[in-house]
Image: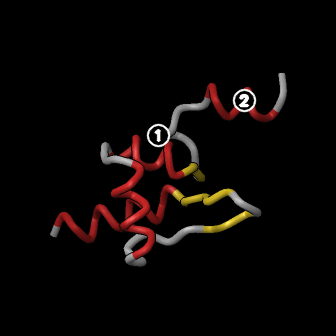
Amino acid sequence: MNHRTLNQNESTTTRQNMSVREAASYIGISQRKFRELIAMRCIRKVRIGSRVIVRRKDIDAYLESKAN
Protein backbone atom coordinates (compact mmCIF):
# COMPACT_ATOMS: atom_id res chain seq x y z
CA MET A 1 0.00 0.00 0.00
CA ASN A 2 1.53 3.33 -0.99
CA HIS A 3 1.43 6.69 0.82
CA ARG A 4 -1.29 8.08 -1.46
CA THR A 5 -3.60 5.14 -0.72
CA LEU A 6 -3.09 5.60 3.01
CA ASN A 7 -4.05 9.27 2.77
CA GLN A 8 -7.19 8.52 0.76
CA ASN A 9 -8.38 6.07 3.42
CA GLU A 10 -7.80 8.47 6.29
CA SER A 11 -10.75 10.58 7.47
CA THR A 12 -10.42 14.34 6.92
CA THR A 13 -11.54 14.87 10.51
CA THR A 14 -8.40 13.12 11.80
CA ARG A 15 -5.91 14.52 9.29
CA GLN A 16 -3.71 17.40 10.36
CA ASN A 17 -3.08 18.64 6.81
CA MET A 18 -5.53 18.72 3.92
CA SER A 19 -5.77 19.68 0.29
CA VAL A 20 -8.11 22.51 -0.70
CA ARG A 21 -10.68 19.94 -1.84
CA GLU A 22 -10.54 18.07 1.47
CA ALA A 23 -10.57 21.27 3.53
CA ALA A 24 -13.58 22.68 1.66
CA SER A 25 -15.43 19.42 2.20
CA TYR A 26 -14.40 19.42 5.89
CA ILE A 27 -16.27 22.70 6.50
CA GLY A 28 -18.98 22.18 3.90
CA ILE A 29 -18.23 24.92 1.38
CA SER A 30 -17.18 24.93 -2.26
CA GLN A 31 -13.54 24.77 -3.29
CA ARG A 32 -13.97 28.15 -4.96
CA LYS A 33 -15.19 29.78 -1.73
CA PHE A 34 -12.39 28.10 0.22
CA ARG A 35 -9.82 29.48 -2.23
CA GLU A 36 -11.38 32.93 -1.73
CA LEU A 37 -10.83 32.59 2.03
CA ILE A 38 -7.18 31.74 1.34
CA ALA A 39 -6.83 34.69 -1.06
CA MET A 40 -8.32 37.04 1.56
CA ARG A 41 -5.81 35.60 4.06
CA CYS A 42 -8.57 34.36 6.35
CA ILE A 43 -7.03 30.89 6.31
CA ARG A 44 -3.31 30.25 6.02
CA LYS A 45 -1.88 27.91 3.42
CA VAL A 46 1.40 26.16 2.74
CA ARG A 47 2.52 25.66 -0.84
CA ILE A 48 4.61 22.60 -1.62
CA GLY A 49 5.45 22.70 -5.29
CA SER A 50 2.13 23.11 -7.05
CA ARG A 51 0.11 21.70 -4.13
CA VAL A 52 -1.68 23.90 -1.63
CA ILE A 53 -1.88 22.39 1.85
CA VAL A 54 -4.03 23.73 4.68
CA ARG A 55 -3.56 22.83 8.34
CA ARG A 56 -6.68 21.67 10.14
CA LYS A 57 -5.80 23.81 13.16
CA ASP A 58 -5.86 26.94 10.95
CA ILE A 59 -9.30 25.99 9.61
CA ASP A 60 -10.59 25.32 13.12
CA ALA A 61 -9.16 28.64 14.37
CA TYR A 62 -10.92 30.49 11.54
CA LEU A 63 -14.22 28.80 12.32
CA GLU A 64 -13.82 29.56 16.02
CA SER A 65 -13.19 33.23 15.27
CA LYS A 66 -16.42 33.36 13.25
CA ALA A 67 -18.46 31.68 15.99
CA ASN A 68 -18.16 34.64 18.34
Q: Quadrant of residue 9?
A: top right
Q: Name the residue beneath numbered marker 1.
A: 13
What x and y, as percent, mark residue 62? 34, 67
Q: Earlier in the sequence, mark 2 or mark 1?
A: 2
Which residue ends up furthest to the right in the rendered image? 2
Q: Categorize mark 2 by other alpha carbons within 10 Å: few (<14), some (14-19), many (20+).
A: few
Q: Categorize mark 1 by other alpha carbons within 10 Å: few (<14), some (14-19), many (20+).
A: few
Would residue 4 be found to the left or right of residue 54 on screen? right
Q: Name the residue beneath numbered marker 2.
A: 6
What x and y, as percent, mark residue 6? 72, 29
Name which residue lies at 37% across and 74% down: 42
Relative to 68, does residue 20 appear above or below in the rendering? above
Would residue 39 be found to the left or right of residue 29 on screen? right
Disc marking residue 21? none
What x and y, as percent, mark residue 5? 73, 27
Disc 2 is placed on an element classified as helix
Q: Quadrant of residue 54?
A: bottom right
Amino acid on which the number 2 mark rests in the picture? Leu
Which residue ends up furthest to the left in the rendered image? 68
Which residue ends up furthest to the top in the rendered image? 1
Relative to 23, does residue 35 appear above or below in the rendering? below
Name which residue lies at 42% across and 78% down: 41
Would residue 2 be found to the left or right of residue 5 on screen? right
What x and y, as percent, mark residue 68? 15, 70
Which residue ends up furthest to the bottom in the rendered image? 41
Relative to 54, does residue 45 appear above or below in the rendering? below
Amino acid on which the number 1 mark rests in the picture? Thr
Name which residue lies at 40% across and 43% down: 26
Disc 1 is placed on an element classified as loop
Would residue 57 be found to the left or right of residue 30 on screen? right
